Image (tube, rainbow, N blue to C red):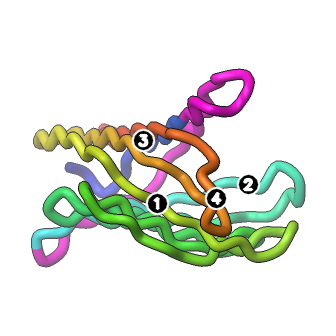
Amino acid sequence: MTKDVRVSVSGIQYDIEPDEAVELITFGDYYHKNGKHYILYDEIDIEEGENIKNRIKIDNGKIEVVKSGTTNGQLIFERGKNHMTYYDSAMGSLLMGVNTSSVDMIEEEDHIQAKVRYSLEMNYTHVSECEITIDVRSVR
């Protein structure tokens, strides 16, 4: 994988009307260190117009997404586990639970793809069933 990558992150919440996928496509940086994949990229908070820094760490089927900026939080996707975290946004701090049912990975020389299915809770209340796809490709 090259240092310069194209990053696509798409997600859908199935229990929310309508079932509409959201996708972010941007460019970022890729690093491989101590057997772990790191993807760094920025996105713009649409409501605030501010920059949000993102770091994705992939380690043997466990995926950690860390956001910092106008939105701060850490989401951990690990099959069969429920991870609780605080997610800070302009609307305040929310206690989020992520219960991951599957993590499917494709790892190739110039391509990494992760598909994750999970249940999302907010303040101990089920919100929706979700799916997220992270697709990272080398830029040549």
Rendered image: mark on residue 125: 4
Q: Which residues are magenta?
A: 12-34
Marks 3 and 1, the one that precedes in the sequence: 3
Could you tell me which residue is drawn at 17 percent across and 38 percent down? Answer: 106
Residue picked out by circle 3: 6
The residues bearing labels 2 and 1 have C-alpha atoms spaced at a distance of: 24 Å
Can you say whether 114 is above or below 54 in the image? Answer: above
The residues bearing labels 2 and 4 have C-alpha atoms spaced at a distance of: 28 Å
Q: Quadrant of the C terminus?
A: top left
Marks 2 and 3, the one that precedes in the sequence: 3
Could you tell me which residue is drawn at 56 percent across and 33 percent down? Answer: 12
Relative placement, left or right, of 49 versus 12 is right
The residues bearing labels 4 and 3 have C-alpha atoms spaced at a distance of: 35 Å
Relative placement, left or right, of 41 versus 69 is left
Can you say whether 10 is above or below 43 in the image? Answer: above
Mark 3 lies on a secondary structure that is strand
Of badges 3 and 1, the one in the foreground is: 1
Mark 2 lies on a secondary structure that is strand
Rendered location of residue 42, percent (x, y):
60, 59
Marks 4 and 3, the one that precedes in the sequence: 3
Residue picked out by circle 1: 98
The answer to whether the residue labelled 3 contacts the one labelled 1, judged by CB atoms less than 8 Å apart, is no
In magenta segment, residue 26: yes
Marks 2 and 1, the one that precedes in the sequence: 2
Residue picked out by circle 2: 44
Of badges 4 and 3, the one in the foreground is: 4
Could you tell me which residue is drawn at 52 percent across and 65 percent down? Answer: 97
Residue type for callout 1? Val
Mark 1 lies on a secondary structure that is strand
